[in-house]
Structures are given as structure tokens and as C-alpha cells.
Image: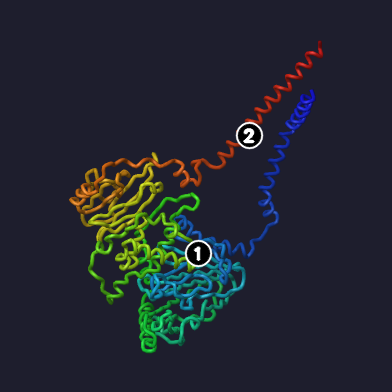
């Protein structure tokens, strides 16, 4: 009976609690609403005025918002700087960098112009000097640097609590390798004039440049009597007994301060030319004048062109490189490689490569060899580079970027792409795209060598050059049944092209501007999953030389693998709230079941006691 009395006691306590549960529930709702609405009421009643920090944050957000969509597509990266003198070490964004294979610059505090060491593959040799303009103003400041990969332009934005706004547009010209341009715009929306002090970030070439000399000269310009320019020259020891790099720098002189009238905008246009030459030690005195005159001639040519035309030249050259590339569907799996890292890596490798080194070596004339002669044998790796984790490491600081660029170029060179790399940035970009999918030019055809087990995401390989007149697009799309499907189209062509899928057991299919689709097939022994060629007879011969004895369609991928990429977990696309609700309902059901059992047992004992009491 003691146990029954204890249970009855707890039953009465629970019943008392249930009597007030509605009151408790109502009280909880009121408290939640008060906590939720308190900040809004507090702001209204307190009439809190925006601070300078709020103004600066809002201004900065307005100017970097246009990069949001580009960032989602992997075409841009934004790094916020809390202080120009000290970058945020906890920021995991990519290095804001400009480069064209001849000179490079990280748009960050204490950076320097970098050139290429004779024994290096990347722009890793600092010259101890930077052309970056540092405006000095007082007040609360917020700052960000945005890198736009397709155009090769870095934009720097500075917003002050007072309303002062500065934007810097910086690029190293893609097709004029010695030229670096800064465009600076200063807006003063206040009612009072503002005086800004201007300085160059790094003025210490003597730390690395031996025998550094500095002088000021005046160059005549078409639209003015002339402007003052700073010219610096010296040599850099490259750790060889008899070899040095001669450097000449020509930069437009900037005022030490600038006054911006109320409600006015002022602009600065600062071109810089950096010339370098590899020479034997002791030759610099004889070649110094030649280097300086070369810089002067280039500067005269640059200043004779409008700034808008010069920038458009640069953008067109970069976009021409960016036409070829890779789209990959976004994966939410932990540690997965996504489009932003791929595009950033592609950008850094291209920005460390000259546009057309063959033209430079041949004094303005290019060889007439066909594209096929350079591309033959590229890419020869057994696995596509998307699975090579060492090629996709952090890109936060200049040392990491240099390591990745060097490793990429070495990998491509050793995998049969050495001829293609020598053609310059366009060839390097093509070699990287080929390596992404394991494509290979071999024996009058292009083959897609990727292992089908890696095709559990969507891919689009853009503008793979087959020859000088033909570009091919190849897509991999996951269907509703979780099977991968290949698509091939011609972006441009001067003759018919044909394709066949794994094993080439079917008749060749002529390609066109619209996508032609093929299933992914597995063969024994393993062969490529796609072949493309303009020679139909050659396509017929491929079938006889593959010697496969089994061809089957690739099976569907496991649902949990696809769910992991699409949703970040194996549970599918249902939101977390759904699963939390399911758990809550299960708990409620068990509590209700416990209550039924408890009431049934206790009420039964009470009924028996009352019945016997009446007797």
C-alpha cells in the first residue's frame, strides 16, 4: 500500500500542476514576446541616434553589396579590414591580389610590388616598394577590399563616420605588363571642407634595391603642360655571383595633401610603370638609362590613352581568359571543394603568368604553330586535379599563394602540359580546365578520362579549345534517378565534330550548338567516358582499338552521398525544425502514454477501495 499511496501523492501533484499549466504557458508566451519586442520599443522610446560607427558600417555595406551575387557565384571575394595598418589574422578570405605575370601586388598593409625570380614560377621576389596611396583622415573608419576575378581588378573602399568616402580601383594591366594603375575617388558629403594627407605606403626600396637612385622629372602630356614623376632605379641580387635584376620604377607624383570642398568629389589617376631586366652584375650602369627610357616611353604611351580605354583593354583581356573555366554545383559537405576556391586558385595562377610570353621572346611576332601541337598530351595525370588536396590549400597570405601557384604550374608541366604552358596565360588556363576533368588531347581526339565515381555533382566545363577555331562545352548533370548524364555542345567551330560515349559502341553523333546528351558508361577494361573528334573515320577506328568486352550504364549514386553535398547531412532536404518537431511529438506521445497508464492503475485501486468501503 505504501507504493500506491506514493503514486497517488504524485498524481495529485501532477493534477495540481496541470490545473495551472495554461497559466504557465500564457506567462511564457508573454515573456518571450517581451524579450523579442524589447529592443524595438527600447530604440523607439530612447530615440537612439546612429553613431559614427553605424554611419561607417552602413556606407561600407552599401558599396560592397554589389559583390554579394558575384561572391555567391565564386567570381569575387571581399575582405574586411579593421585597420589598414594591421590586417585581421582571423579573416579566412582570400588574398586581395593583382598581377599580370610581370609584376604583382597584394592590396594589403605593408605589401610590396613583386616580380619573378629567374628560378621561380611565381611572382615571389619583393622589391621593397609599393605604389599604394594611403590617405590619412581622422575619425571612425570602416574598410574593405574586394577582388573581382573575371576582370582582374581590386577595389578598396573606405568609409568614415563623418560621411567621408574613398574608393580605390587598382589593377596591373593584363596586356601592358609593365603598367599598374590606381584610380582614386574621394567624396565629401559634409558641409565643411576636408583636407586629406596622402602618402605612399612603402618608401623603402633601398632595403632591397641596391644602388637605389631617386629623382623627379617632368613629362609632357597631351592635355597639359606636363606632370611630375618619380623615377627610382636599382638592382636586386638574385643570390647568384654574377647575375642581378635591374629595376626602374616610374610613378606619377602625388600631392602631399588634397582639399575636398563641401559636397564635392575629387579624383586622382596615378599610373605606375615598373621595368625590369635580368643581367650580369656590373652591366646595370650601362643598362640603367635604357631601363629608365623604356619606362618613360611606356608612360608616354599610357598617358596618351584615356583612362577608360586603358581600363577596358585590361578588362577585355581578362574576360577573354575567363571565358574558359569550370562551374561546379555547391556542396555543403564539410571540407568540400567549391567554386569560390576553384576560381580564386585559377585567378592566382593566371595572374602569375604572362599573357603571351612567346610574343615577348620573338619581338612582337608569334609562331604560326597550331593549338593542337601545343595541347597534344595534356593532361596526362591518372586522376583529375579536383581530388588533389595539396592543390587546394589556404590562399590567405602571399606565401601560401606563391606555394600553390608554383605547385600548380609544376604539376601541369610534369603531366604533359609543358608546351601549352609556354603559350602564356591562355594556355595555362586551358591546361587547368583540362586537368579539372582529366581531359586529354591524344591521337587526333579529345577524351574525357574522369572516373565515373566522382560524378556525383553537377559540372560544366566551359570553352575547352579543341583547335584555333573550335571550343567545346561539356556538362555533367545529375538526373532525378541519381544517375549522371553527359552533355556536349560546340561553342564555335569551323567544321563538323563527332562524339561517342564510353566504349564507342554506338554510332558517332554529330555535335552542334545545342547540347547533345550521352549516358555515363562503365567498361571493362576501364576507358574514357567520352571521345570528341572532327574525323568521323577516326571515331570509327577508336571502337576497334579500345578492346572492351563489357559495357554497362553507370549505376545511380547513393542517395546519402548526394544528400550530403546538397544539404550537408545524410538526412535529405528536410529542415532541422522538422526533425526537432518529430522528436518533440515523440516525447509528448510517450508522456501521454505514461499518463494513461498511470491513471489507469491508480484509478483502478481507488475504485476497488470505495467499493469495499460501502460493503
- Outermost residue toward the left in this view: 537
Q: Which residue matches tag 1?
A: 396
Q: Residue 587 carries which label?
A: 2
In the rendered view, tell whether residue 123 sits above or below residue 64. below
Which residue is at the front of the view, 134 or 424? Answer: 424
In the rendered view, tell whether residue 78 sits above or below residue 262. above
- In the rendered image, residue 223, in percent from the top left (x then y), is placed at 39, 80
Which of the image's four quarters has the N terminus? top right
Disc 1 from disc 2: Cα separation: 47 Å
Name the image quarter holding residue 164.
bottom right
- In the rendered image, residue 480, in percent from the top left (x then y), is placed at 39, 40
- Outermost residue toward the bottom in this view: 285
- In the rendered image, residue 340, in percent from the top left (x then y), is placed at 45, 57
Element at label 2: helix
Which residue is at the front of the view, 299 or 497? Answer: 497
Q: Which of marks 1 and 2 is nearer the N terminus?
A: 1
Which residue is at the front of the view, 289 or 277? Answer: 277
- Outermost residue toward the top in this view: 615
In the rendered view, tell whether residue 187 sits above or below residue 34. below
- In the rendered image, residue 186, in percent from the top left (x then y), is placed at 52, 72
In the rendered view, tell whether residue 46 sits above or below residue 555. below
Which of the image's four quarters has the C terminus? top right
For label 1, count other residues whose C-alpha is less than 10 Å away and answer few (under 14), some (14-19) or many (20+): some
Identify the residue shown where x is 34% and y is 69%.
355
Element at label 1: loop
Amino acid at each position: 500500500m505504501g507504493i500506491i499511496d506514493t503514486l497517488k501523492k504524485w498524481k495529485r501533484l501532477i493534477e495540481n500542476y496541470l490545473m495551472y499549466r495554461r497559466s504557465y504557458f500564457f506567462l511564457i508566451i508573454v515573456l518571450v514576446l517581451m524579450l523579442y519586442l524589447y529592443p524595438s520599443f527600447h530604440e523607439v522610446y530612447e530615440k537612439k541616434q546612429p553613431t559614427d560607427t553605424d554611419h561607417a558600417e552602413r556606407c561600407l555595406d552599401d558599396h560592397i553589396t554589389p559583390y554579394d551575387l558575384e561572391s555567391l557565384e565564386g567570381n569575387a571575394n571581399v575582405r574586411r579590414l579593421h585597420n589598414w595598418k594591421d590586417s585581421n589574422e582571423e579573416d579566412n578570405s582570400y588574398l586581395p591580389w593583382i598581377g599580370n605575370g610581370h609584376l604583382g601586388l597584394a592590396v594589403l598593409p605593408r605589401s610590396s610590388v613583386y616580380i619573378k625570380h629567374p628560378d621561380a614560377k611565381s611572382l615571389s621576389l619583393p622589391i621593397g616598394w609599393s605604389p599604394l596611396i594611403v590617405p590619412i583622415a581622422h575619425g571612425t573608419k570602416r574598410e574593405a577590399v574586394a577582388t573581382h576575378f573575371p576582370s582582374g581588378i581590386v577595389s578598396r573602399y573606405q568609409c568614415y563616420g563623418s560621411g567621408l568616402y574613398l574608393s580605390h580601383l587598382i589593377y596591373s594591366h593584363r596586356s601592358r605588363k609593365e603598367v599598374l594603375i590606381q584610380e582614386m575617388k574621394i567624396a565629401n558629403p559634409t558641409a565643411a571642407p576636408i583636407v586629406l594627407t596622402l602618402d605612399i605606403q612603402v618608401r623603402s626600396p633601398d632595403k632591397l634595391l641596391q644602388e637605389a637612385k631617386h629623382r623627379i622629372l617632368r613629362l609632357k602630356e597631351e592635355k597639359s603642360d606636363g606632370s611630375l614623376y618619380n623615377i627610382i632605379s636599382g638592382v636586386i641580387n638574385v643570390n647568384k655571383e654574377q647575375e642581378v635584376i635591374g629595376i626602374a620604377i616610374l610613378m606619377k607624383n602625388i600631392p602631399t595633401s588634397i582639399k575636398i570642398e563641401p559636397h564635392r568629389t575629387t579624383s586622382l589617376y596615378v599610373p605606375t610603370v615598373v621595368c625590369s631586366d635580368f643581367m650580369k652584375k656590373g652591366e646595370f650602369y650601362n643598362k640603367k638609362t635604357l631601363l629608365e627610357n623604356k619606362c618613360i616611353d611606356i608612360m608616354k604611351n599610357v598617358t596618351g590613352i584615356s583612362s577608360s580605354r586603358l581600363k577596358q583593354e585590361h578588362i577585355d583581356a581578362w574576360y577573354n581568359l575567363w571565358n574558359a573555366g569550370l562551374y561546379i554545383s555547391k556542396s555543403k559537405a564539410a571540407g568540400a571543394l567549391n567554386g569560390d576556391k576553384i576560381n580564386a586558385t585559377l585567378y592566382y595562377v593566371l595572374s602569375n603568368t604572362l599573357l603571351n610570353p612567346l610574343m615577348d621572346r620573338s619581338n612582337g611576332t608569334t609562331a604560326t604553330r597550331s593549338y593542337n601541337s601545343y595541347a597534344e598530351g595534356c593532361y596526362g595525370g591518372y586522376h583529375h586535379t579536383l581530388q588533389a588536396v595539396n592543390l587546394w590549400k589556404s590562399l590567405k597570405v602571399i606565401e601560401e599563394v606563391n606555394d600553390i601557384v608554383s605547385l600548380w604550374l609544376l604539376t601541369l608541366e610534369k603531366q604533359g602540359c609543358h608546351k601549352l604552358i609556354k603559350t602564356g596565360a591562355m594556355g595555362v588556363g586551358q591546361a587547368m580546365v583540362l586537368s579539372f576533368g582529366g581531359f586529354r588531347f591524344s591521337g587526333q581526339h579529345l577524351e574525357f578520362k574522369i572516373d565515373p565515381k566522382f560524378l556525383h555533382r553537377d559540372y560544366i566545363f566551359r570553352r575547352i579549345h579543341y583547335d584555333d577555331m573550335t571550343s567545346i562545352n561539356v556538362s555533367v548533370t545529375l538526373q532525378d534517378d541519381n544517375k549522371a548524364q553527359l552533355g556536349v555542345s560546340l561553342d564555335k567551330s569551323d567544321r563538323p565534330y563527332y562524339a561517342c560515349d564510353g566504349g564507342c559502341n554506338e554510332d558517332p553523333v554529330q555535335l552542334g550548338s545545342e547540347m547533345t546528351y550521352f549516358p555515363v558508361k562503365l567498361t571493362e577494361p576501364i576507358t574514357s567516358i567520352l571521345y570528341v573528334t572532327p574525323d568521323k573515320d577516326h571515331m570509327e577506328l577508336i571502337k576497334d582499338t579500345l578492346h572492351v568486352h563489357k559495357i554497362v550504364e553507370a549505376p545511380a549514386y547513393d542517395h546519402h552521398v548526394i544528400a550530403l553535398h546538397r544539404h550537408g547531412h545524410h538526412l535529405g532536404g528536410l529542415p532541422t525544425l522538422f526533425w526537432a518537431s518529430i522528436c518533440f511529438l515523440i516525447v509528448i506521445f510517450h508522456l501521454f502514454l505514461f499518463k494513461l497508464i498511470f491513471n489507469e492503475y491508480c484509478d483502478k485501486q481507488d475504485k476497488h477501495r470505495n467499493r469495499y468501503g460501502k460493503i
